[in-house]
Amino acid sequence: MQELDVIIVGGGLLGAAVGYGLAKAGQKVVILDGDDTDFRASRANFGLIRTSGKGASCPEYQNITRRAADSWVEFARELRDVAKTDVELELDGGLYLCSSASNSNQLFYNAPGSLESRREMLQALHLQSGEPEPDFEMLERQDLQKLMPRAQLGADISGASFCRRDGHVNPLKLLLALHTGFQSHGGTLLPGHRVTGIRNEAGIHLVTSGDASFRAPKIVVTCGAESLDLARQIGIEASLVAERGQILVTERCERIFPYMMNGLRQTVDGTVMIGATAEKVGLDRSTNVSAAVSLARKTVKLFPQLQGLKLVRHWSGIRTKLERGHPVYGSSQTVNGAWAFICHGAVGMAPVHATLLPEWIISGERPAILQPFHGRQVAAAAA
Amino acid sequence: MFRKLHDPGPSAVTILIDGKAVTAEPGENLAAVLLRQPEGWNRTSTVTQSPRAPYCMMGVCFECLAEVDGVGSVQTCLTTVRDGMKVSRQLGRRVLSA
């Protein structure tokens, strides 16, 4: 193998975006990706670009998620040109349904709460952002109904917030586009290459995967829920909350949902995606019927006309959620040329991951906007 | 393409397929009835609108879908005919609006 500039460990949405940006800049990069038996959060993704509600008590996170969303149209165009893949971007705005029923069920992720509490929270975030105009408006039930005339709102829906900068995309096509773009810019993608060891010898990282070994002056760890061990080996510490999300997927039907919502979106070809649970079960990616029943029941309550739709898929993923609530974009202080990037929401953040992170890796200078995202520093584990 | 071998005689039932009256045998499989119509197909696919016909005849391939008595995406290979049953070929995506 020719001389490498960067080794990326983990080829999911985060690693692939970084690799894409590096390869585009002319760097010689190899991505070592795992197997289908790994957690593969990027393949269990719901596909949302959601800035609404994010960044409480972390204005910098609010800032970068908004910046990423605002770069998405341009990014999708670039992926279409370079990777010849249409990622099915719809960026017309996003809804967050609110309910008049009391929500005592802790099972669901982003469950509808009251209209008033949603408004209060978004207003506080708007003030934190310092933007001159709010990027959201609150919709009462009748206005929400007008926004989706073909859908029949269930009785409990009291309204929704509408955020103009949000939307959704096909996450599997996004991953494909990033992989394709990476390779067309000269990057080497090696699936089935789970990394078993990282060693540092005189400034060069020696990375082993079974019998194969790779050497480069720079290494980036982006393997989602399994990043912690490898990150520790390069002196970066983080804490994850292992949270499982189960999703249901329906047969294709006529398009009745024009905007993405919390826990419900309809794709370009008519598939309805139903999400999601939020279960603290450790690193357990199994699915169960009781979750499917709960998800189906809550969906039919929200939109009774979905009652007879056939379900065709049921899957789960482990959310790569940081305990502190915002991403780790860390560079090692003890080992040269070593980074670990861990985040939840790598779909929305893709345009930033494909630009700012590669710039940082190439120059060695942490971008000012990423200042608050370093991980906890620890001594690198002994070789 | 398919032709029924057994004539049900006076016990025959009548179903409607896209408004056309079709004779069937009590207990006959609905997908089999659809297959022995001159058209042969029961739906068009949701993405490319290509005509599809029943395939596995055992409920696992989902090609045999049709609208039966107002309900869409019914697996006709798991359905037995009933006198007066109304069947419509399903064109493209399932319709949801009332």
Image: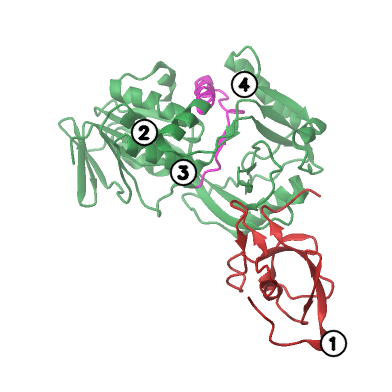
Mark 1: secondary structure:
helix
Q: Earlier in the sequence, mark 2 or mark 3?
A: 2
- Colour of chain B in the rendered structure image: red
The one of B45 and A245 positioned closer to us in this rendering: B45
The one of A108 and A313 positioned closer to us in this rendering: A313
Chain shown in green: A
* Vertical placement of residue A349 versus A293, above or below: above
Mark 3: secondary structure:
helix
Q: Which residue is mark 4?
A: A125
Q: Which mark is residue B10?
A: 1
Q: Earlier in the sequence, mark 4 or mark 3?
A: 3
Q: What count of labels does the image hold?
A: 4
Q: Residue at x 72, y 88 (%)?
A: B6
Residue A221 visible in the snapshot: no
Q: Residue at x 24, y 52 (%)?
A: A210
Query: Looking at the image, is mark 2 or mark 1 nearer the viewer?
Result: 1
Q: Is residue A210 left or right of residue A9?
A: left
Question: Seen from this angle, which residue lies furthest left?
Answer: A202
Using the numbered discs, state the Cα–Cα distance from disc 4 to disc 2 in whole angstroms. 32 Å
Share a chain, discs 4 and 2? yes
- Judging from the image, mark 1 belongs to the subunit labelled B
Q: Amino acid at mark 4?
A: Leu
Q: Amino acid at mark 1?
A: Pro
Q: Magenta segment range?
A: A44-72
Share a chain, discs 3 and 1? no
A325 part of magenta stretch: no
Q: Amino acid at mark 2?
A: Tyr
Using the numbered discs, state the Cα–Cα distance from disc 4 to disc 3 in whole angstroms. 28 Å
Is the residue marked by circle 1 packed among few (<14), some (14-19), or many (20+) residues within 10 Å?
Answer: few
Q: Which residue is mark 3?
A: A42
Q: Which residue is mark 2?
A: A20
